[in-house]
Amino acid sequence: MTSALRGVDVLLLEDESLVLMSTQEVLEGWGCSVRGFTHPDPCFAAVEERLPDIGVLDVKVNGHSYDLAELLDQRSVPIVFLTAYEKAHSRRWSNHPLCQKPCVWSELQQLMLKALKRPAQPPQGVR
């Protein structure tokens, strides 16, 4: 069975290198094309270079995750936020999905499908 996320271009922002690498590995395992960054500054240039299909953003990255989210939102790019903090999500962004870290990969997959308005499927290749 083919993943419903195959071919999806993901902009991933996560300031912890090991979490970035593991998340990128999982997303690529689902067939996503991932541009991963540990700092928001190069993300802005990446968006200008090529608009992603979806942004997967850690909430607390040098205080600029919401600036990047604003740019993506202005361009109608769906966003899934990641956070290890229970009360980290601002009211402004409460209409966007939030995945608690450590991520349950099947939950992230379903949130991404929902944000992309693709039909939910049984989790594939996730634990």
Image (cartoon, rainbow, N blue to C red):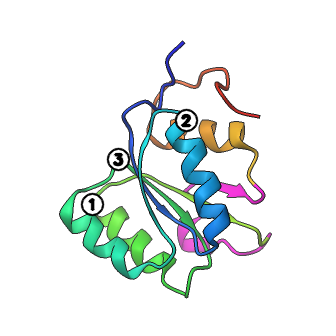
**Of the residues under marks 1 and 2, which one precedes in the sequence?**
2
**Residue 87 covered by magenta stretch:** yes
Marks 1 & 2, CB-CB < 8 Å contact: no
Give the residue pinned by disc 1: 75
Q: Amino acid at mark 1?
A: Arg
Q: Amino acid at mark 3?
A: Asp
Tag 1, which secondary structure? loop
Which residue is most to the left?
49
Q: Quadrant of the N terminus?
A: top right
Residue 35: x percent and y percent?
Answer: 40, 57
Give the residue pinned by disc 3: 53
Residue 29: x percent and y percent?
Answer: 55, 35
Tag 3, which secondary structure? loop
- Label 2: few (<14), some (14–19) or many (≥20) C-alpha neighbours in 10 Å: some
**Residue 93 covered by magenta stretch:** yes
- Label 1: few (<14), some (14–19) or many (≥20) C-alpha neighbours in 10 Å: few
Query: In front here: 105 or 100?
Result: 105
**Of the residues under marks 3 and 2, which one precedes in the sequence?**
2
Quarter location, residue 92: bottom right
Give the residue pinned by disc 2: 29
Q: Amino acid at mark 2?
A: Gly
- Label 3: few (<14), some (14–19) or many (≥20) C-alpha neighbours in 10 Å: some
Residue 54 to residue 65: above or below: above
At horizontal 35% and vertical 54% (from top left) the residue drawn is: 77
Marks 3 & 1, CB-CB < 8 Å contact: no
